[in-house]
Amino acid sequence: MDDVTLARAIHVAAIVHWIGGVSFVTLALLPGVRRLAAPEDRARLFEQVEGAFSWQAKISVTLAGAAGFWMTHRLDAWYRFLDPGFWWMHAMVAIWLVFTLVLFVFEPLFLHSWFAERSAHAPEETMALVWRGHLVLMTLSLVTVIASVLGAHGALY
């Protein structure tokens, strides 16, 4: 087994964990919190459960980015970013960048405090907004995963 094969396996496993977690939060956790908790308790419950996944997501996003960079470097595939036929590679980097910024920059700097403050005044509206945001990110992520698999197998070029 060569290093590119190992990097590809790490890349795929990290993405399965990361996007699978986003899907779980969007399709199971957030609706479950809405059904099972009183409006004033939803934000606290969501943060407690989702917080257990946050550090895992940070590891997965980091591994996916590092492995993707390694594969691009080792395969000398930088030229693909200049070719519109490889748009799905741009989509992978864009999704990775969004999640990297959210997890490592926006959450620590202001999202946690914004969420706590807003949910104290408008708990139902805040949770609905959080669910919509997760739904958009999950949908864009899944479209990117599908396009990337098709693109990597030559179906989009």
Image (cartoon, helix red, strand yellow):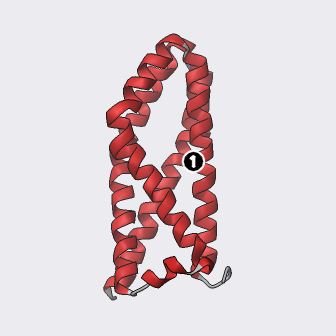
Mark 1 residue type: Leu
- Give the residue at x 37% y 31%: 110
Task: Give the answer, above or below, for where 85 lies relative to 54.
Answer: below
Q: Residue 146: x, y in percent?
A: 63, 67
Neighbours of disc 1 within 10 Å: few (<14), some (14-19), many (20+) = some
Q: Is residue 18 visible?
A: yes
Q: Residue 3: x, y in percent?
A: 31, 84
Residue 149 vs residue 120: left or right?
Answer: right
Secondary element under disc 1, as helix, strand or loop, is helix
Residue 101 vs residue 128: left or right?
Answer: left
- Give the residue at x 39% y 83%: 5
- Give the residue at x 64% y 60%: 143
Q: Residue 85: x, y in percent?
A: 62, 80
In the rendered image, the residue lying farthest to the front is 82
How many numbered badges does the structure rendering display? Answer: 1
Q: Residue 67: x, y in percent?
A: 36, 71
Q: Which residue is mark 1?
A: 137
Task: Give the answer, above or below, for where 115 lies relative to 149.
Answer: above
Quadrant in the rendering for residue 125: top right
Q: Is residue 38 visible?
A: no
Image quarter of the C terminus: bottom right
Q: Nearer the viewer, residue 4 or 104?
A: 104
Quadrant in the rendering for residue 44: top left
Q: Nearer the viewer, residue 12 or 106?
A: 106
- Give the residue at x 67% y 79%: 156
Task: Give the answer, above or below, for where 146 lies relative to 57.
Answer: below
